[in-house]
Amino acid sequence: MPLAAVLLCVVLGVLAVFQLALVLGAPIGRFAWGGQHEVLPVRLRIGSAVSIVIYALIAALALDRAGLVDVVPDAVSTVAMWVVFGYFVLGIALNAISRSRAERLTMAPLSAVLAVLSLLVALG
């Protein structure tokens, strides 16, 4: 489903901007990584930078699975999108049990949106 893939990429793009803000020291850490730090320490900033790369890879896989680009063999994008779906379902649970209320209230629902969109892409 091309629309779901594009919407998934848009949401991932917004998350990438959020993660970049964290990398650059924005005081919004209450929404990420357990919410224990307003400004992230270096190790978590590195984690946010890695997240941006992961989001880009997921976006490429979603666009490939939807037939909008041809990056990897179809079998790879098919299996990979199911893995991505599982990743976002796990994200719902992990964000829902966060000690940070801000993270629970924003990232758990956002993870649910990502899970639904990735499911739609995986189903093709």
Image (cartoon, helix red, strand yellow):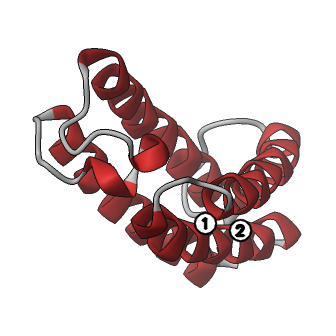
Task: Give the spatial CA distance, label 2 vs label 1.
Answer: 6 Å
Identified at 67% across, 66% down, the residue is: 66
Task: Find out whether the residues at labels 2 and 1 contact each other: C-beta distance under 8 Å.
Answer: yes
Q: How many marks?
A: 2
Image spot of residue 49 (x, y percent): 33, 29
Q: Is residue 117 visible?
A: yes
Image spot of residue 32 (x, y percent): 40, 49
Identified at 71% across, 68% down, the residue is: 115
Image spot of residue 84 (x, y percent): 73, 49
Q: Is residue 3 above or below residue 8?
A: below
When asked about the image quadrant of residue 10, the answer is bottom left
Q: Which residue is mark 2?
A: 115
Q: Residues within 10 Å of mark 1 (few under 14, many from 20)?
A: many
When asked about the image quadrant of residue 62, the answer is bottom right
| Amino acid under disc 2 | Ala
Q: Which residue is mark 1?
A: 111
Left or right of residue 84: residue 101: left
Identified at 13% across, 49% down, the residue is: 27
| Amino acid under disc 1 | Ser
Image spot of residue 22 (x, y percent): 22, 42
Q: Residue furthest top?
A: 43
Q: Residue furthest bottom?
A: 3
Which element is circle 2 on?
Answer: helix
Between 1 and 86, the one nearer to me in the picture: 86
Identified at 41% across, 26% down, the residue is: 47
The quadrant of the image that shows the C terminus is bottom right
Q: Is residue 54 above or below residue 43?
A: below
Q: Is residue 9 visible?
A: no
When asked about the image quadrant of residue 37, the answer is top left
